[in-house]
Each structure stands twice: as C-alpha cells, then as structure tokens.
Image: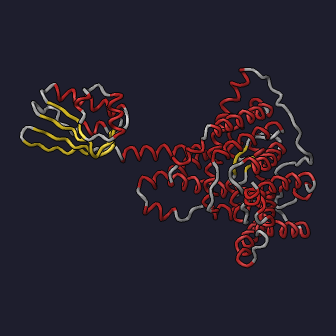
Amino acid sequence: MIDILKKEWLTDPKTNILAGIVVALALIPEAIAFSIIAGVDPMVGLYASFIIAVSISILGGRPAMISAATGAIALLVTPLVSEHGVEYLLAATLLMGLIQLVLGILKIGKLMKFIPKSVMLGFVNALAVMIFTSQIEHIFGISISTYVYVAVTLLIVYLVPRFFKAIPAPLIAIVLLTAIYLFMGAEVRTVGDLGAIERSLPSFIIPDVPYTLETLRIILPFSISMAIVGLVESLLTAKIVDDATDSYSSKNRESRGQGISNIIAGFFGGMGGCAMIGQSIINVRSGATTRLSTFTAGTVLIFLIIVLGDLVVQVPMPILAGIMVMVAIGTFDWGSFKYMVRAPRTDAVVMVVTVAIVLMTHNLAIGVIAGVILSALFFATKISNVEVDRTETEGAVSYRFNGQVFFASVDTMMNQIDLDEENKAIELDFTNAHIWDDSGVDAIDSMITKLKRKGNRVSIRNLNKDSRKIINELSMINKEELI
C-alpha cells in the first residue's frame, strides 16, 4: 500500500505540481467555452472540471490523466438544456454516472482490446484536428497583437524545453506573457471575454425535477449517450497516455471512477465530463506521471476561481490558444501519411473514415464506433473466403476445406461443392477449417442432406475440438458419420 502511494502520488512532486498548475490554467477557458456550448452558466462547467479532476485523481485507473467538463458531452446535452433547463441536465448527469459505474462493474474496459490500431490512429488525428480548429476563433480576425502573442507563445513552448526543463514551458509562457499584457496592454481577447466567473465554492444540491417516469423518459436517452461517449473518450485517452508513458492503467477502475466522479459532479451543480486528451497530453508533456498532477489541476482551478478570479479573467486568450495549437501539433500522428501508403488498403480506409466521421459529427465516440464496425466488416470479408480442394480416386471423393466456416463464408463454401455427385463415397475433411456458428453447421447439414439424396455415402473427418462440439450440439446429421 505504501509503495503504491509513493509511486502514484509522491514520485517527483515538484514536476507533477507544476504540470497540474499549467493544466488548471488551460482548463478555465475550456470549461467556460463548453458551458456556453451546453447553454448553461460558466460556473456549471468550472465546478464540473474542479470536482471531476479532484475525484478522478483518487478514484480513476490512470494516473496523470486529466478529466473535466468536455466539449463532447456539452454538444450532446444542448437540446436537453434548451428544452428542459439546467436541472434536468444535473439529473441526466447523475444517471450518466450511475450507468458508467454499472458498466465499470461489468468490466466494460475489456472491450478496449477490440479497437484496432487504424481506429486509434483515426481517433488521435481527428482529435488533433478538432483541437486545432477549436482555437481558430481565438486567433484569426481579431488583431495584429493576437498574432504576435500566439507566435511568441509557440516559440516559447517549442524552444524553451530544449534549454530549460525545470519549469514547464507552457507555464512560463502564461506567466511571462500575461505579465507583459498587464504591464503594457494590447488589443487581445481575455479569458473574461468568454464569460463571468463567480468566486464561490460549489454547494450540495439535489436536482429540482419531478422524480417520475416521465422525467426518466426525458433524461435516459441523453444519459446513455453521455455515458457511452464519456467512456469511449476516457478509455481511448487512457490508452494513449499508457503508450506515451510506457505504463499500464486499469480501464475498469477508470470506468467506475468516471461514473462516481460524474455522480458527485451532478450533486454539486456540475455538468457531465470525461477524460480530456488535450489537457492530458499537456500534463504528460510537462513531466507529470502521478495522480498528484490531476489533483493539483483540480485544486488549483478552484483556487484560481475563488482567490485569483480577478487576475485569471485577464489572461490573454491567444496565449492559451497558442499552447493548444502546440498540443494539436504534438497530438497528430505525422507517421500516418507513411502508414496510409504502407498499411493494407482496408486499414488506411478505416483510419480515414474514422477521422472523417469524427470531424463531420464532432463526436469522437461515433467516429470510433463507426471505425470499429467498418474494421470488423473488412475483417469478416477478408476471412470469408473458404477454399475447397476436391480430389477423386476410384469412386471416392474427398473435399478438403481450408478457412473459417461461419455466416459470411457459407455461400463461398457451398458454391465449390458439386451437389450432383452420385453413388460415391464422399469425405468432408476439415483438417484446415474451423466451424464457428450455427450458420456454418446449417450449411454442412444442408450439404450432407443434398449429397445423400443422390445415393452418396458421406463422412466428416478431422474436426477440431471446438468444431466437433458445435456439430454435436447443433447438427441434425448422424453422429456416426463423424470420424
């Protein structure tokens, strides 16, 4: 227990605290922007970011990953808020958390192994594009000073780490350039231009909604969507942070932690949230490795709101936009262009389709699910070609099957069998084949029945253990014919 505490909380505390401070500063404009998208007061997003970050640092399965209010969830709840109000949003957030908690208990994290590399690449690249495009409104068409602040921020974040790593470069950029702005002034937008910040702690509330089946009917579709989108984004982000840090995280614990964190957020006036890949990458690239960084991000966020709120609202937006642009550049997998040329064409198509759907829907979960389905269809098509070799000697015919026998391959298999054979001893050899489902069994039953009608004697040879088991359980053929 002590070793785990040291590893997950107390390793290199200085670096993790500094990384958390950088993330906290980056969270404020994001949380305000997401609140505006959802149609709620900025404090709803800020409270959610504080509560989720602090609670997930303790309950989550991935150290150094940042969770807070997110744009993916905000986009989903916009219709709910506009039609029914913020109280229904809080109720939906509570139900969202409960659904995620149940899915975590059911070990939903195991499904991560079914997401192929091509989908992961598409997810990462689409996210990088979304991070970049979300900053365009804070950079272009505002003023010359905005371009200058962005350019200087990019230079600091890019060059400083080459010579000095004791303090994260993004933090240096924020402190230095904000000080210059406060001293000299400039025609730039600030955090305060996004929305007002109320300097108070969140308080415990119970959503003021009728606790009836009608309320459940209203919020359930939103809660299910929020839960699924939140988990997909969180588990994929955890996988990306795993790869970036060469470490392993518990996806099932992360699922449960996300659920409990969203329940707490709902009871304290916060909207739903999930893992944030942009902020997580900022955190990791600032040197964070432990839960202390995530905890620091949450606590510093509320400190900035309550104690330094008047100063925070004066932070120029082009500084934060410049930092996020560097995150987007670092997030994009530039090796994807070579991958598209060298990888199998189907994998390249899956990656491109995943990116395209994410960008069209602005929903990472939909893109990932579509990519997984398309990848599965390509895989099923690839293995659906069963080869059948026929040999004949003195009135005896042997059919040797090679491949996977299942619903998608039975037509290919049946088309290679001569069902007009008459009065022969026919052997069906499955040495190099595997029967997977009832469609495969039904096809074999049909094949044998039709061959027997022509006076043939049919036997089945060399079934492997699993194929023999499914034949014994589902087939209508005479089991004495199995050899």
Q: Position of residue 113 (x, y in %)?
A: 53, 48
Give the colour scheme of this rendering: secondary structure
Q: To which quarter of the image does residue 178 belong?
A: bottom right
At 36% across and 31% down in the image, what residue appears? Answer: 438
Q: Is residue 323 above or below residue 462?
A: below
Above or below: residue 423 compared with residue 255: above
344 or 329, which lies in front?
344
> In the depicted view, which residue is nearer to us: 89 or 179?
89
> Quick check: can you spot residue 362?
no
Which of the pair 62/84 is nearer the observer? 62
Q: Quadrant of residue 405?
A: top left
The C terminus - image quarter: top left
- Residue 412's place in the image compared with 447, above or below, is below
- The image position of residue 20, as x and y in percent, is 79, 59
Please indicate whether residue 42 sits to the left or right of residue 277 in the image. Answer: right
Q: Residue at x 73, y 79 (%)?
A: 163
